[in-house]
Every structure is written in structure tokens, then in C-alpha cells.
Image: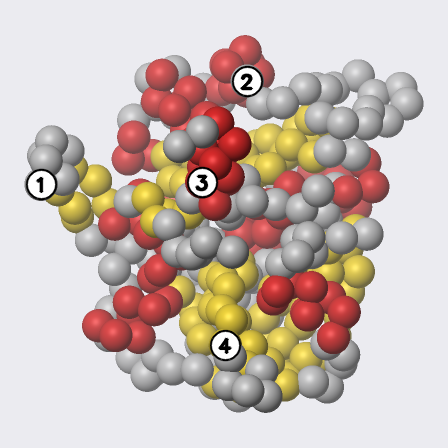
Amino acid sequence: MNTETDAINEALRLDGNAVAGELQMLLGFDVTVLQTTCSHCHKEGLFANLLAYVRGPG
Amino acid sequence: MEKFQWQIAQVKAITQETPRVKTFTLQLPQWIAHVAGQHYDLRLTAEDGYQAERSYSIASPPEQTGEIDLTVELIDEGEVSSYLHEGIAVGDPLEVRGPIGGYFVWKDNMANTPLLLIAGGSGVVPLMAMLRHRARIGATNPTILLFSVRTAEETIYGQELRQLADEATGFTLLLTYTRQVPQAWTGYQRRIDRAMLTEVLNQFTDKPNCFVCGPTQLVEQVANTLVDLDLPTDTIRTERFGPTGA
């Protein structure tokens, strides 16, 4: 990683809102208000606040 | 509940908001009343079957029935936004699905609580739906929009926002210009920072519900600062728009 790619990755970072349509299509309900718990640090939050990287390279 | 599926909308009108931003008014065969702040997904399909999909916030209030306004910023080399800006005309079909999202929404039961809206650039779009809906339901809760724009020319919905602010319904518009400051401007002229957020929060007597939307870096910095300034995390809602235009 270098500073330039870090900046690009940061700018492209989205959140759970961005994948809500796809998941609603698959699951049949809105996921953005689901409670989440980090399996590593146990921090609790909402699905909408999870970070999402949805664009591949290029 | 109606089935969540793709549908073919028809472009009813195209409005140039700023040099790089257009609003597409879409007529929907299966219109569903949305909640201000929600978005639609839009999908383009090329002749060879290649598909590209993006999410766009709804700018219109739910009172505007049968259609939605999607306001789209032209992103350099953005395959969807550039096609919408350059290849779409009134009458064309567009494939969309929605409304989507139950988190970044301003619900009617929030109408009596102070409201702080913070936007960078096209992040103002879902917040505009909230302000338009707020006006339609006659809410008078103390409301501030802190809107970071590069130049006066790039202020999306500038005229309408100033009109809303003039209506004395408890709504205050605070613009901050980050690149080119209009002559005789005495307001903010820098990126949103801690001192600015402190001043804005001091204008509220009670803690507001906060909605923050715009470029990812702006959203994260603002949200972190609001938490630092002792706002409860469950009153701060964020939506990252990713990169924005030049």
C-alpha cells in the first residue's frame, strides 16, 4: 500500500446503504437497520454503518 | 408489501441544476411512496449484456406521487453518470428499483426534534427530499442545513434552498464555500471543521438529529467530530457517496 492507493481506496469506500438494494432483492427485506456485532472486537452497530468496498480495480 | 423488483421508468423531464448536475424526473409504472432520504438503484444494460448499476438518492418528497426525481452529478469517467448526462433524453426508458433503505431516513416521528443536515456537494440530494417533505407537512422544528460547496455556481438547489430559508419555518441555510467565494460573502469559506460544527451546534437548544451525506472523507470526518462533540451516536446518520466530480 502507498499513500496514493490509500487515498483512492478511502475515496471509493462506501457503506452498507450502497448494497441495500442488492441484498433486499436477495433476502426480501431491508438490511440497513439490522444490528451488527463485530466478531473481532464485539463493537455493536447497524448494517448501514458497515464499510463497503463495492467497486473492483479499474 | 409490494414486490421489490426492477421496473422500467420513463424519463419525464431533465433539469440542469448546475453545470455538472442534472435532475431526472422519472415516471414509475409501480410507484411506491418513499421515505425522505431513501434511494433507488439504476441499472444500464449494454447491447452485449454488460450491466452497470449505481445508487441515486431521491430528491423529491413522497408527496410528489407517481414519479421520482433523481439528481445525478457527472463523475469524470463515471460510466453510469456520463451516460445519463450525455445519452439520455426525455421519453427514454430507464431501469430502476426502489425505494431502498430504512436507516438514512427522516421519519415523520422526527418532525418535532431539531434537525441538523450536513452535506458536501451532491450529498445534499437526500437532504433536499427531507427539506421538501418537511415543508409539505408544515413542520417548524429548528432545522439547519450546513452545505459545503466549491463555488456559488455549483450550489445544487441554491435558489430553492434560499426560498425555503426565507419562509420562516425554523429552517436556516448555512453555506460554506471551499474553492471560490462570492464577492461580499461574509459567511463560512472553508472546509467543515470542528470550530464550525461547534458554532452550528450552539444554535440548537436541544440536541438535533443529524444526517451527514457527501464524499466519503467529509462524511467520516464530520461524523467523528460530532461524536467528539458529545452527540449520541444513535442520533447521527451517515451516507457515503464515495468519490465526487472534479
* Quadrant holding the N terminus of chain B: bottom left
Q: Residues within 10 Å of mark 1 (few under 14, many from 20)?
A: few
Per the model, the C-alpha gap separating discs 1 and 4 is 34 Å
Question: Which chain letter goes with mark 4?
Answer: B
Residue identifier under label 4: B51
Q: Badge 2 sits on which subunit?
A: B
Q: CA distance from mark 3 to mark 1?
A: 24 Å
* Image location (x, y in percent) of residue B242: 50, 46
Q: Are labels 3 and 1 assigned to the same chain?
A: yes
The three-letter amino acid code for the residue at tag 4 is Gln
Which of the two discs, 3 and 2, sits closer to the camera? 3
Give the Cα distance between marks 1 and 2: 33 Å
Query: Would residue B210 be seen by someone viewing this image from the given angle?
Result: yes
Q: Nearer the viewer, residue B136 or A2?
A: A2
- Quadrant where the image shows the C terminus of chain B: top right
The reply to whether residue B134 is visible in this rendering is no
Give the mark toward the camera: 1 or 2.
Answer: 1
Q: Under tag 3, what secondary structure?
A: helix
Q: Give the Cα separation between the discs numbered 3 and 2.
A: 23 Å
Q: CA distance from mark 4 to mark 2?
A: 39 Å
Residue B124 % position (x, y)? 60, 45
Determine which residue is flagged by label 3: A9
* Nearer the camera: disc 1 or disc 4: 4
- Please state which amino acid type lies under the numbered disc 2: Asp
Vertical side of B238 occupied by A53: above or below: below
Q: Which residue is mark 2?
A: B193
Image point (25%, 74%), residue name: A26
Question: A1 or B162, which lies in front?
Answer: A1
The residue that disc 1 covers is A39
Residue B103 place in picture, x, y as percent: 34, 51
The alpha-carbon separation of the residues under discs 4 and 3 comes to 23 Å
